[in-house]
Image (cartoon, rainbow, N blue to C red):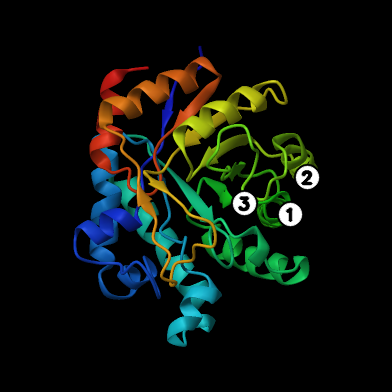
Amino acid sequence: MTELTILDGGMGGELQRRGLGRSGGLWSAEALLKHPDTVAAVHRNYIDAGARIITTNSYSTIPSYLGKEGMAERYQELTALAGRLAREVADASTHRVLVAGSLPPLDESYRFDLVPEDASSAAVYETLAQALLPYVDLFLCETMSCAREARNAAAAARKVAGHSKPVWVSWTLAEQPGEGLRSGESIVAAVEQVAQSSPDAYLFNCTDPQAISSGLKALRVLTDKPLGAYPNRFHVPGGWTLDNEIKTVPRDMTGSEFVEFARQWRARGASIIGGCCGVGPEFIQALAAAEL
């Protein structure tokens, strides 16, 4: 069995636990502006817990979020800052730690109906990738809710990086296991749409762990590339956005349950495992201690 690579967990939730990063507006980008030392501390906490890949805090350094405070033009600057902070923490570690450059949805997570048109998506994704390029070891196109969103992000990352750095694609799945992406598209269609960019790994994230188990079973027969998983701890109702009044619902999952899901995922071919929203360092520590 391929050796397990442990990713970090969620950044936004950890910032909120420390009294930072409102669950709206600028969200986790606010900490880059006001408390970059805390962002670095969260990265270190995940490394101490056993993560060997940390993800840049660039999920919300996008024009749509920054524009809420009139700072859309600063997205390249703040994305580069997120990359630099992660790089400095990784390089200071006594462990070999890689940095994944987050390329997120450009409007709202899970909202395939709000994905910008292709030309504008390409321009923003390429700028984000250029800002991260000096600092990251790989690009992570994450929480992709539809095939087109993933295609745009992966194509931009590959255009900027060429084949000098890996490009990983991670989709978010429908909450009900077996129903494909949040857009309703099949996993087969999702893989076909990104094929031209030749991703180096395929993952599922920010979704129900049982849906991930089902997704990995389907994905395993489609590719021999590395597979990965990093779930969240929230159920996301339809129509949710960061700023509206629809609330996410906490999902009960203990550290031991998270490890049991990880065992399932390992059995289904996953070699890259971590956590997303609500999955903190204690979960990553439990995963590392399990030695799967």
Whether 118 is drawn above or below 288: the answer is: below
In this rendering, the label closer to the viewer, 3 or 2? 3
The amino acid sitting under disc 2 is Gln
Identify which amino acid the numbered label 1 is placed on. Arg
- Which residue is located at x 69 percent, y 46 percent? 184
Question: Could you tell me how far apart the alpha carbons at marks 3 and 2 are, in whole angstroms?
Answer: 13 Å
Secondary structure under tag 3 reads: loop
Give whichever of discs 3 and 2 has the lower sequence position: 3
Q: For this view, does 167 lie left or right of residue 229?
A: right
What mark, if any, has residue 88 been given in the picture? none
Compared to residue 154, the image places residue 260 above or below, namely: above
* Image spot of residue 270 (x, y percent): 52, 24
The residue under label 1 is 148
Q: Are marks 2 and 1 in contact (CB under 8 Å)?
A: yes
Residue nearer the viewer, 172 or 238:
238
In this view, 130 is above or below 253: below
Q: Residue at x 70, y 36 (%)?
A: 187
Q: CA distance from mark 2 to mark 1?
A: 7 Å
Q: Which residue is mark 2?
A: 193
SS for callout 1 = helix
Residue at the extreme bottom of the image, as rendered = 70
Q: Is residue 180 left or right of residue 192?
A: left
Residue 229 spot, x, y in % from top left: 49, 34
Residue count near mark 3 (Cα–Cα under 10 Å), binned few <14, some 14–19, many ≥20: many
Q: Position of residue 83 (x, y in %)?
A: 44, 59
Residue beneath label 3, please?
145
Residue 88, position in %: x, y? 34, 54
Residue most toward the top?
Answer: 1
| Quarter in which the C terminus is drawn | top left
